[in-house]
């Protein structure tokens, strides 16, 4: 999976998005201040019907429909 691929994304809430993958971002967030635990979350940005959907990769199943040329 890479930027520019046409993807089909099924979200855990049974929503399906088909569009172009335009960005992949990894963000570090403080999970527990008391124990200094940092959580890394990966977000994918999918351009779908003229709108950018930002989805948590852990909550989705992503299938690459076609690779970028």
Image (spheres, rainbow, N blue to C red):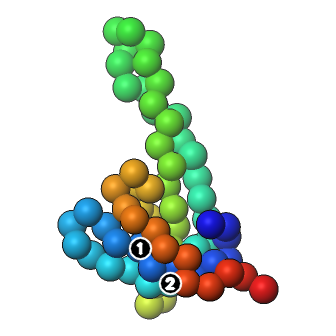
- Residue farthest left in this picture: 13
Horizontal side of 25 relative to 10 (left or right) equals: right
Count residues near mark 1 (Cα–Cα under 10 Å), then give few for <14, some for 14-19, many for 20+. many
Closest to the observer, 17 or 52: 17
Q: Residue at x 34, y 72 (%)?
A: 10
Q: Give the label on residue 9, or none.
A: 1
Q: Residue at x 41, y 73 (%)?
A: 9
Give coordinates of residue 2: x percent, y percent. Answer: 67, 67
Task: Tell me the quadrant of the picture where the C terminus can be found.
Answer: bottom right
- Residue farthest right in this picture: 69
Q: Residue at x 60, y 59 (%)?
A: 24
Count residues near mark 2 (Cα–Cα under 10 Å), then give few for <14, some for 14-19, many for 20+. many
Whether residue 20 can be seen here: no
Q: Secondary structure at mark 2?
A: strand
In the displayed structure, would residue 1 be above or below residue 49?
A: above
Give coordinates of residue 17: x percent, y percent. Answer: 38, 80
Per the model, the C-alpha gap separating discs 2 and 1 is 8 Å
Task: Tell me the quadrant of the picture where the N terminus can be found.
Answer: bottom right
Whether residue 11 can be seen here: yes
Give coordinates of residue 5: x percent, y percent. Answer: 63, 78
Q: Give the label on residue 23, or none.
A: none
* Residue 37 placement: quadrant: top left
Q: Give the label on residue 19, or none.
A: 2
**Looking at the image, is mark 2 or mark 1 earlier in the sequence?**
1
Badge 2 vs badge 1, beta-carbon distance below 8 Å: yes
Q: Residue at x 44, y 56 (%)?
A: 57
Closest to the observer, 37 or 65: 65
Q: Secondary structure at mark 1?
A: strand
């Amino acid at each position: 999976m890479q930027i520019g691929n046409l993807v089909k994304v099924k979200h855990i809430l049974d929503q399906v998005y088909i569009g172009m993958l335009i960005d992949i971002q990894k963000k570090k967030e403080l999970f527990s201040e008391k124990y200094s635990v940092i959580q890394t979350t990966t977000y994918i940005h999918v351009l779908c019907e003229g709108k950018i959907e930002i989805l948590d990769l852990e909550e989705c199943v992503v299938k690459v429909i076609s690779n970028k040329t």
